[in-house]
Amino acid sequence: MRKTAWLIFSLLVFRFATAGAAPAQTAAGALEFSAHITPTAARSEPVRQFTFYILTKSYTQIVKEAEEKDPAPDRNAFIDGLQASPELRAWFKAHDTLDLASPDLDKLLTADDILGVPEFLAAYQRSNSGGATMGFPKPKYTEADRTKRPEKYEKLRQDYLKALRKYLHAHPESVTTIELEFQDSNPQRKWDALLSARHKRVSRTAPDLAQLKFLAVKAETDLEGHALVSGLPPGDYWISSLNLDASAGDMRVHWDVPVRIEAGQTARVELSNLNSVEASGSNP
């Protein structure tokens, strides 16, 4: 009987002890942070009345998630869809550019490229036509020869290409303005439009995704750039400005700073230029 009473007493003591320990283990923590930006050759300024988002996932990773759901356009598929010769499509795939209007195009083109890709050959001929280039070779065949005298046509064409190659080597400057011939037919503009449209979609999706799935709480800084958030469950968080930039003077920055919240404790973070990402353009 005494053993039974002692066992019951021990169980009650254990339950009382564990019941008291559970709240301590799950007690909420707090986050106190301040944000300042230091412009070039100027004093640090507080980021006043700016909304920060306390997230349960890095905003950088959230952007990647949004990008995965809206993949970037396939470059090879884009090239395959161009109204271009097979030779030009092959050239695009072999080179890291689609910009035929680039001032550096002439540096990318070899004699084989110019003579072997119909669009480059036609552009080279146009840019040196009209008698502006002294001694520029002229073809001695006509399109009519292609059907009426195919053998003669091919021989004269090969002779012409040899003369062009010789001229190219002797006058490399004759290629320098070839990009001007592609101002109205440059595929880079269409490619840029596709990338821009996708960037805008991600820019709309990522902030919404962050707030719908990963937002713990919002916090607005006061006039001193200070904010306090309480009642946060223990765990890993990120102090984020999403796709919004804070600015001071010549500096535009945004933050995605990790912080760990411990039970019953206050984590303190200083947001500054050092742990920010400098804005180089519009952010998703």
Image (tube, helix red, strand yellow):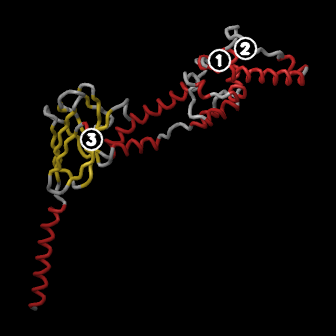
Give the residue at x 66% y 32%: 89
Label 3 vs 2, first from the N-terminus:
2
Q: Quick one: which residue is furthest to the top in this view?
A: 131
| Residue type highlighted by circle 2 | Phe
Q: Where the C terminus falls, by quadrant?
A: top left
Q: On the picture, is 110 further left or further right than 251?
A: right
Quick check: 284 above or below 235?
Answer: above
Q: Residues within 10 Å of mark 2 (few under 14, many from 20)?
A: some
- Residue 123 visible in the picture: no
| Residue type highlighted by circle 3 | Asn
Out of 227 and 218, give the one closest to the viewer: 227
Report which residue position mark 3 lands on. 275
Q: Which quadrant holds residue 115?
A: top right
Q: Residues within 10 Å of mark 1 (few under 14, many from 20)?
A: some
Report which residue position mark 2 lands on. 136
Give the residue at x 87% y 18%: 145
Out of 211 and 85, give the one closest to the viewer: 85
Q: On the picture, is 249 further left or further right than 105?
A: left
